[in-house]
Image: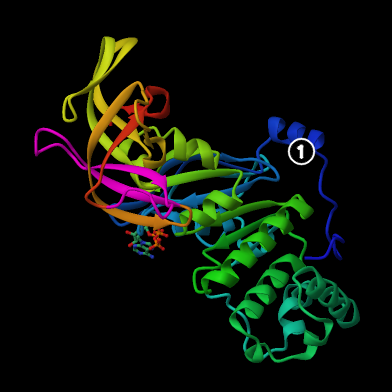
Amino acid sequence: MSDRTGPGFAPARDATAQEQLSVEQPALALRGVTRAFGASRAVDAVDLEIREGEFFTIVGPSGSGKSTLLRMLAGLDRPTAGDILLRGRRVNDVPANARPTAMVFQSLALFDHMSVGDNIAFALKMRGVARTERLERARGLLDVVHLPASYLDKPVTQCSGGERQRVALARALASDPDILFFDEPLSAIDNRLRKLLQVEIKELHRRTGKTFVYITHALEEAMVMSDRVALMRAGKIVQVAPPLEIYDRPTSRFVAEFMGEVNVWCAVREAGGVALPELGLAFPGETLPQAEGLLVARPEKLAMLGEGGGAQAIVAGTIVDEFVLGSRKQIHLRPDGDASRPIVFGEIPATPDAPAPGARVRLGLAFADCRFVTE
Ligand SMILES: Nc1ncnc2c1ncn2[C@@H]1O[C@H](COP(=O)(O)OP(=O)(O)OP(=O)(O)O)[C@@H](O)[C@H]1O
């Protein structure tokens, strides 16, 4: 997208001002927010703070309550209990069109009988902005979302999927909202274009300094775009953290498994070490309070050991399967010994002479690269 900030945009706030704002007051705060449908709670007593200017993404399985939560944040639905505060002001009963926010929907919800320009300028028309000024703003926004100025009069029905996506984005930006909500905006778009639009949305976020709240099914999207990710399960938020932290330091098995492929082994933590009875392994030397739980380790943390190479714990076995992921491949290893031992996922370079199914390898693992969780 172009370098200029575009019409109607406040310039991006500098980091210090942004930090001060976020320390003083979150852009959005949820206090015990609940949305019940009959006896079931689609959103269940959620407490959450979204910082001013951050790119905040909500992920979770289908039916976990993401859309319901976003609809309440955007003023399209009301909580049945709890409060939503927008910069400290309670907005439970303030409708969407009276909030300084805008929403980009998965369906895009464009007006098919209108031109691109009229779609973009629609919110301005509703606010009584004169036609000449509206079209001027729309022209500037076309540039911001990388569409040619000649598209102003083009029927929106003649736009491709990606172009329609950009029109929807420009329309959301037209009223210069403080907060933009995105409800899976890229889910219907092919992979290559989706990647490009991800970059453009991220760039737009950086350039405008606005608060973006985004929901997606696509984990990769959450990982590359967000400042923080919240994971929802059955109406509750189970962890909120920056992308790498939620991936590397999950607080539960559910989070670990949702965020990517992972090994999960029963573990016993006691003074003197952590034992993995299923694998017949132990990490000696750790002196921690006793607990039974699980040890989780991402496949890429299990590295192949060369001849004579050592590690804190070693799993030796036979490769039973492989999945090439670019320059690396994930291998599934059947550990030696007891046949009931769980298959272990590791990762090795995908070179032509790399071990393939049937080969024997040794994978090394360090305790610091694992997470001990109790649920
Ligand atoms: N209007 C409604 N009436 C009754 N139940 C509803 C209503 N809207 C949502 N629900 C229920 O609330 C739960 C959460 O739905 P929601 O659409 O928020 O989930 P989601 O995480 O966005 O799912 P998806 O990823 O599939 O879009 C679901 O069990 C859903 O059936």
Q: Which residue is mark 1?
A: 18
Q: Position of residue 81 (x, y in %)?
A: 44, 45
Magenta segment boundaries in residue numbering: 328-356
Specify whether 362 is left or right of 222.
left
Q: Is residue 194 above or below residue 335?
A: below
Which quarter of the figure has residue 8?
Answer: bottom right
**Is residue 374 among what the camera can see?**
no
Q: Position of residue 217 (x, y in %)?
A: 44, 59
Which residue appears at 53% of the width and 56% of the height?
Answer: 221
Q: Position of residue 320 (x, y in %)?
A: 22, 50
Residue reaching furthest left? 339
Q: Secondary structure at mark 1?
A: helix
Which residue is more in the foreground, 331 or 222? 331
**Is residue 319 among what the camera can see?**
yes
Which residue is more in the foreground, 14 or 180? 14
Specify whether 20 is left or right of 98.
right
Which residue appears at 18% of the width and 39% of the height?
Answer: 342
The question of residue 346 being in magenta is answered with yes
Q: Position of residue 64 (x, y in %)?
A: 37, 53
Q: Quadrant of ligand 1?
A: bottom left
The question of residue 370 being in magenta is answered with no
The quadrant the N terminus occupies is bottom right
Give the colouring mode of the picture.
Answer: rainbow
Residue type at numbered disc 1:
Gln
Which quarter of the figure has residue 13?
Answer: top right
Which residue is more in the foreground, 84 or 11? 11
Which residue is more in the foreground, 359 or 237? 359
The quadrant the C terminus occupies is top left
Which residue appears at 52% of the width and 70% of the height?
Answer: 191
Which quarter of the figure has residue 17?
Answer: top right
Around disc 1, counting alpha carbons within 10 Å, would you say few (fewer than 14), some (14 to 19), or many (20 or more)?
some
Q: Is residue 171 above or below residue 243?
A: below
